[in-house]
Amino acid sequence: MHIFKTLDIRGLSFFSASDKMAKAFKGVTRNGILEIILDKKKNVTEAFQRWAEARGYSVFNRDEDPRMVRLFIKKGNG
């Protein structure tokens, strides 16, 4: 079974947000998905995308509007 979680980290500092994201991934099974909602104005989307990819996760969708960015990250088989 794939777990789908949503984590809204708008308004948090980068370090608090990355800590929450790391903890949220512990509850996601292999091939599960974590949706992360970010502040567009803070311009941290690329940093979170690199964080995920460095850990073997894949960002398979990115949805943006003027207020926020939603990253959909899949936890790999590893």
Image (cartoon, grey):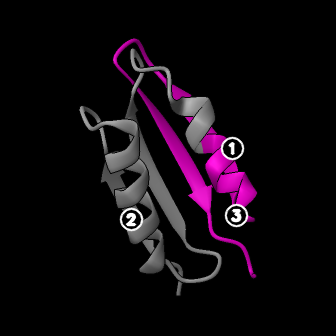
Q: Are marks 3 and 1 in contact (CB under 8 Å)?
A: no
- Circle 1: residue type: Arg
Residue 48 appears at what percent x and percent y? 56, 42
Residue at 24% x, 32% y: name it: 11
Q: Would residue 1 appear left or right of 67 to someone viewing this image?
A: right
73 falls in the magenta region: yes
Residue 31 is marked as none
Give the distance between the C-alpha atoms of the residues marked 1 and 2, in whole angstroms: 19 Å
Query: Would you call the spot at circle 2 few (<14 residues within 10 Å), some (14-19), or many (20 or more)?
Result: some
Disc 2 target residue: 5
- Circle 2: residue type: Lys
Circle 2 or circle 3, nearest the eye: 3
Residue 50 is marked as 1
Query: Would you call the spot at circle 1 few (<14 residues within 10 Å), some (14-19), or many (20 or more)?
Result: some
Residue furthest to the left: 11
Chain-order first, disc 1 or disc 2: 2
Give the distance between the C-alpha atoms of the residues marked 3 and 1, in whole angstroms: 9 Å
Q: 20 or 32, which is in the foreground?
A: 20
- Circle 3: residue type: Arg
Residue at 74% x, 81% y: name it: 77
